[in-house]
Image (tube, rainbow, N blue to C red):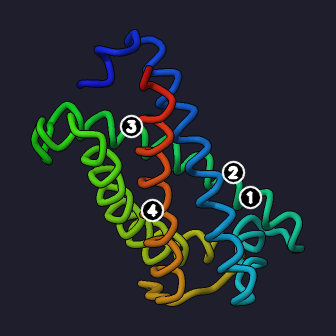
C-alpha cells in the first residue's frame, strides 16, 4: 500500500491499531448517545444480567473497542483482497472513502449477526427476552452510523498519522 512507502510496516501497524481504536471509541460515543436518547442504553447492561446506565456505558465502550479491533482485521483482509482497486487505496481521498464504505457494511453485518441473531439467543439465557430474529430498526440505523463513522475516522486518522 502507498502508506507503507512513507513509514515502516511496524509503524503503519501501530498507527492502524490506534486509528481503529480511536475511530471505534468516537463512533461508540455517537452510537451510545443515539441509544441513550432512545432509552435503549440499559438494554446493553441487561444482556449481562446487570442494570444501570453507567454499567451499560461501560459494556458499550467495551463493545465499541472490540468492534474496532475486528474492523481493523476486516480492513487488513480487504487490503489484501483489494476489492476497491489499488488506485483507490493509493489516492489520499480513496482510502477514507473505501474504509467508510467498508465500515457502513460492517455496521450492517454487525446488526445482522449480533442484534438480529445473537441478542435474542443470548437474551433467553439471561432472561432478556426478544423475538427471533430481533429486527430492531433503530439499532440498525445506529450500527450503520457507527460503522460508517468508524470507517471514515479510521481512514482519515490512519492517513494523517502515516503521512510524512
Q: Which of the 4 quarters of the picture holds residue 22?
A: top right
Judged from the image, the secondary structure of the residue bearing numbered disc 2 is: helix
The residue closer to the viewer here, 4 or 27, is 4
**Residue 147 marker:** 4
**Residue 59 marker:** 1
Give the left or right position of residue 40, taking residue 153 as reference. Answer: right
The residue singled out by tag 2 in the image is 62
Q: Earlier in the sequence, mark 3 or mark 1?
A: 1
Circle 3 Cα neighbour tier, 10 Å, few/some/many (<14 / 14–19 / ≥20): some
Image coordinates of residue 74 in percent, x first then y, are 34, 43
At a point 89% along the width and 66% down the height, the residue shown is 54
- Quadrant (top left, top right, bottom left, bottom right) of the C terminus: top left
Q: Which of the 4 quarters of the picture holds residue 35?
A: bottom right
Pointer 1 and pointer 2: residues touching (CB < 8 Å)?
yes
Image coordinates of residue 78 in percent, x first then y, are 23, 40
The residue singled out by tag 3 in the image is 73
Judged from the image, the secondary structure of the residue bearing numbered disc 1 is: helix
Circle 2 Cα neighbour tier, 10 Å, few/some/many (<14 / 14–19 / ≥20): some
Q: Earlier in the sequence, mark 3 or mark 2?
A: 2
Q: CA distance from mark 4 to mark 3?
A: 14 Å
Amino acid at each position: 500500500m502507498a502508506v507503507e512507502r512513507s513509514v515502516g510496516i511496524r509503524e503503519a501497524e501501530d498507527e492502524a491499531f490506534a486509528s481503529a481504536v480511536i475511530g471505534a471509541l468516537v463512533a461508540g460515543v455517537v452510537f451510545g448517545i443515539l441509544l441513550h436518547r432512545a432509552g435503549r442504553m440499559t438494554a446493553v447492561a441487561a444482556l449481562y444480567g446487570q442494570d444501570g446506565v453507567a454499567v451499560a456505558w461501560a459494556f458499550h465502550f467495551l463493545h465499541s473497542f472490540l468492534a474496532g479491533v475486528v474492523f481493523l482485521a476486516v480492513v487488513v483482509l480487504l487490503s489484501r483482497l483489494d476489492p476497491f482497486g489499488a488506485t483507490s487505496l493509493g489516492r489520499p481521498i480513496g482510502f477514507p472513502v473505501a474504509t467508510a464504505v467498508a465500515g457502513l457494511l460492517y455496521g450492517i453485518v454487525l446488526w445482522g449477526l449480533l442484534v438480529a441473531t445473537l441478542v435474542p439467543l443470548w437474551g433467553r439465557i439471561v432472561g432478556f427476552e426478544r423475538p427471533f430474529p430481533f429486527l430492531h430498526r433503530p439499532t440498525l440505523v445506529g450500527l450503520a452510523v457507527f460503522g460508517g463513522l468508524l470507517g471514515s475516522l479510521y481512514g482519515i486518522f490512519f492517513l494523517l498519522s502515516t503521512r510524512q
